[in-house]
Image: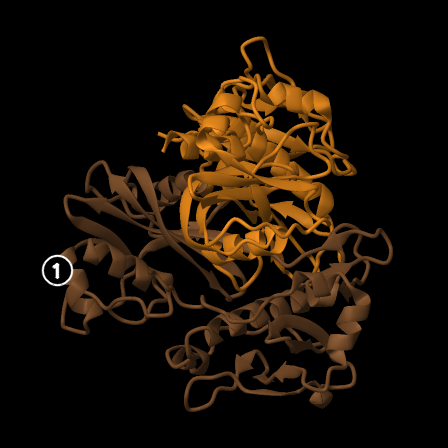
Chain colours: A orange, B brown
Amino acid sequence: MIAPGFTGGLLDRSDALRHDAEAFAAAASDFRAKLLKLDGYDPEIDAEGRLAWTSIAERADDAELVLLGLENGRPHFAAYTPGMGPPRGRPQRLFAMLDHLAPGEAATYAAARSVLDWHARHQFCANCGTQTALFRAGWGRTCPNCHAEHFPRVDPVVIMIAEHDGRALLGRQPAFPPGRYSALAGFLEPGESIEEAVAREIMEEAGVRVTNVRYVASQPWPFPSSLMIACVGQAEDDAITLDTNELEDAIWVSRDDVRKVLANEPGPFLPPPPYAIANTLLTEWAAD
Amino acid sequence: MIAPGFTGGLLDRSDALRHDAEAFAAAASDFRAKLLKLDGYDPEIDAEGRLAWTSIAERADDAELVLLGLENGRPHFAAYTPGMGPPRGRPQRLFAMLDHLAPGEAATYAAARSVLDWHARHQFCANCGTQTALFRAGWGRTCPNCHAEHFPRVDPVVIMIAEHDGRALLGRQPAFPPGRYSALAGFLEPGESIEEAVAREIMEEAGVRVTNVRYVASQPWPFPSSLMIACVGQAEDDAITLDTNELEDAIWVSRDDVRKVLANEPGPFLPPPPYAIANTLLTEWAAD
């Protein structure tokens, strides 16, 4: 059973509540209802890696509630505060926390962060420019002028290794921590399948042609709201032509090398962190 | 080799050209450059199911060019005309055409349609409400006020069958043509994986719990801009609890039934059309 980071959430999203104003109002005034505690967009976590919650009675006067879901019938909310700007950068403090979040908790946090960030960046109607209002329990915004309805974006990203003669192709972006190599990745575009996006991205970034693309696993990635789709493709040969605008370096690594670095033993590179699906992808590939 | 509808495009998207103003200007004044002929948002096709093209010299004075890609170095464009509203409904004429489009041609059309439709619905900055301008060869819009960059949406949709005791679960939406049943489907949300979205949607729409979700194939779906992700999940039992807001009916069908109706023989339902990935999914499942 593959369990990538940011998966395994335990809340029932309860789509029905989003469409039922009366039921939503009851949930929002339920004395048991919980509000996710956030410091800006960062979670607060306890020693066991669990998210901190408070009562929704503690919310700011102008806060707008986003229904994260139900747990045993008990409503769980996050609060969007009008004027709250989008998150800036990815604080190291948050990334250190992600290593400690308990399974399932990171999934709840990911949903909350993505939706709040989306509200912060989507206050206006893309169709007519008018200020929009939150609706559907926080899972959409609607325009009072042209009546367009807008829903949170999820941007599919393909993330993949090319495989050749028992070795995997990894790349290094300039912004990576020293020594790290990871799977190549890029946004999927309108008018292409997952398999086509995988082939296009590996060709663009490394000049390697792949066929027989195989899906491995997926995870949400809340920076701001990607769906990471992890795949393996078969490379026709191992000659690399690097796109230096995207990658600083690309290397072919053996299964032995991958097993070693995932076990924290010295090897030719440092692997991506456990909460990133590139780590899951390499773990699966090395176990084959 | 699985080849779902709207895949197999032959144009090289040439991402490098989008980032190089000089090269883009050269492509846009290349005398060999071709412009996709459209009637509104509908394609014009010849007797062999190929898309019709004209010279970019034929474009309207105010047209903005979207680079679809290169074929043997020859630039292919679509034109966005400011003021062009989004498409309305899905004309039957278009759906009849889709059956006749040659492989690869539907993929080129899908990319063009999705991007033009996106421009039509995204003239304003979601962040600040200011009118935006096309950039990156038509693959983005940028805001002159807050400098936010916006990129075409691709909305991931899971489409799936639950499997139980050799039978597959299919559903019927009220808007379907008479007799048609198809795979269940729904938008993937922020904070969930493909596998989690599949399980949630089948539970919401049919009350069936699935595990061991297996990815089968994907396709772009340009109405307006979805990525259809086709999967099969194992149902724990076959008791159906229908969400009548979503589905009119749901049934369990055997492999024999599916093979029959895909071969145009009489059976208990009419299948989805060949250009829809639900058709590919049923074909794969029936062949297992």
Compared with A239, A271 (above or below) is above
Is any part of residue B82 visible from this angle?
no
Q: Is residue B76 left or right of residue A244?
A: left
**Residue name at image x 71 percent, y 56 percent:** A125
Above or below, A29 against A160 in this view is: above
For disc 1, the neighbor class at 10 Å (few under 14, some 14 to 19, many from 20) is few
Helix or strand or loop: what does disc 1 sit on? helix
| Residue A49, percent from left and from top | 55, 14
Q: Is residue A180 above or below residue A239?
A: above
Asked whether residue B256 is in view, the answer is: yes
**Residue A287 sits in quarter:** top left
Q: How many marks?
A: 1
Horizontal placement of A127 versus A221: left or right? right
Residue shown at 56% from the left, 45% from the top = A136
Kindly identify the residue that appears in the image at 20 percent across and 38 percent down. B237
Q: Quadrant of residue B7?
A: bottom left
Identify the residue at the far top of this view: A47
Say which quadrant the N terminus of chain B sits in. bottom left
Residue A72 placed where, x, y %? Answer: 41, 23
Quarter residue B249 falls in: bottom left
**Foreground residue among B9 and A121:** B9
Give amino acid for label 1. Answer: Asp
> Could you tell me residue B271's position as x and y percent?
26, 66
Which residue is denoted by mark 1 in the rendering? B256
Q: Nearer the viewer, residue B25 or A122?
A: B25
Q: Is residue B63 above or below residue A157?
A: below
Residue A206, horizontal then vertical, whole percent:
60, 50
Chain identity of mark 1? B
